[in-house]
Image (cartoon, rainbow, N blue to C red):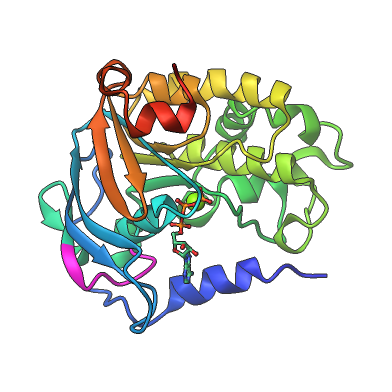
Amino acid sequence: MVSPEPKRFFSVLDSSVEKNGGVKTAQGVCAHIEFKDINFQYSASGENILKNVTFSIQPKEIVALVGRSGSGKTSLVNLLMRFYPLETGNIFLDGHDVHEYELTEFRQYFSYVGQHVVLFNDTVANNIAYGPLNGRMSREDIVRAATMAHAIEFIETLPQGFDTVIGENGSLLSGGQRQRLALARAILKNAPVLILDEATSALDTESERFIQDALDKFMHQCTTLVIAHRLSTVKQANKIIVMEKGQVVEIGTHEELLAKNGHYNRLYEIH
Ligand SMILES: Nc1ncnc2c1ncn2[C@@H]1O[C@H](COP(=O)(O)OP(=O)(O)OP(=O)(O)O)[C@@H](O)[C@H]1O
Ligand SMILES: [Mg+2]
């Protein structure tokens, strides 16, 4: 059976709500991001699930977004990547409102690994080097990215290795294997902004530890927004944004937030 996720993903990507105009392009530099007074609701009648969200991310900074399930973390990332239109507030990328960018070019700014991995009925290699990267990356580069994402171990066991066709939305793969392919894709793309939204949640503890080591190094290369439940990932962030019910309730480093003895402590039950 085909999962409904890819359909939804494409309907969002292809939706006409986003105008495809603008001038700016990604230049392979680390980006600066600013969220300003973001209020957001999914439907006109629904309640605001993001309320007055304001914070910025400096180039090369690692910012961790933490908060209970449903606090609005993924929604904020979806708005940043223009998967939904923003009606109140602004998001700036390198000083320009995100809506000023031409949409296809805009997407080149982001390496993204989310909670739901989208794969295509194509070969493993083409799933890693996908979109504009397709045909432009050497097999060597693809293998290197797969190795960093610890995907090489299972790819080598597939009947045709990197040339194995993985089925509709990767239906022949496990959740953890799909997530490793998505990580390899993000590593290969090496965009100005890396977004990891529970990027290792489908992995077992051992695989997660291996991949986390690789990601920890990779995260320092460019501007990174990471949503994670693992305290070790969160601790190394330059800045931690704590969200509750759609609002930013605390901002600081691990040490600063510990000293506050507030939301962050309760979230991680640190005493
Ligand atoms: N596509 C959608 N349509 C309508 N409501 C949505 C949609 N996606 C999320 N929501 C709602 O928005 C709120 C915030 O959800 P969001 O996915 O941003 O939370 P989250 O902090 O990422 O949670 P989690 O840690 O479980 O991933 C929730 O109340 C959720 O039910
Ligand atoms: Mg989420």
Q: Where is residue 69 shown, x and y percent of the image? A: 50, 49
**Most foreground residue, 128 or 249:** 249
**Most foreground residue, 225 or 164:** 225
Q: Is residue 88 above or below residue 68?
A: below
Q: Considering the image in quadrants, where does the N terminus appear?
A: bottom right
Q: Where is residue 59 shown, x and y percent of the image? A: 21, 32
Q: Which residues are magenta?
A: 82-89
> Does the magenta run of residues contain 92?
no
- The answer to which quarter of the image holds residue 103 is bottom left
- In the displayed structure image, the side of residue 221 where residue 157 appears, left or right: right
Q: Considering the image in quadrants, where does the C terminus appear?
A: top left
- Residue sitting farthest toward the right: 159
Q: Where is residue 66 shown, x and y percent of the image? A: 40, 38
- Residue sitting farthest toward the left: 95
Q: Is residue 35 above or below residue 191?
A: below
- Residue drawn at x 32%, y 30% is 262
- The answer to which quarter of the image holds residue 189 is top left
- Residue drawn at x 83%, y 53% is 172
Q: Is residue 215 visible?
A: yes
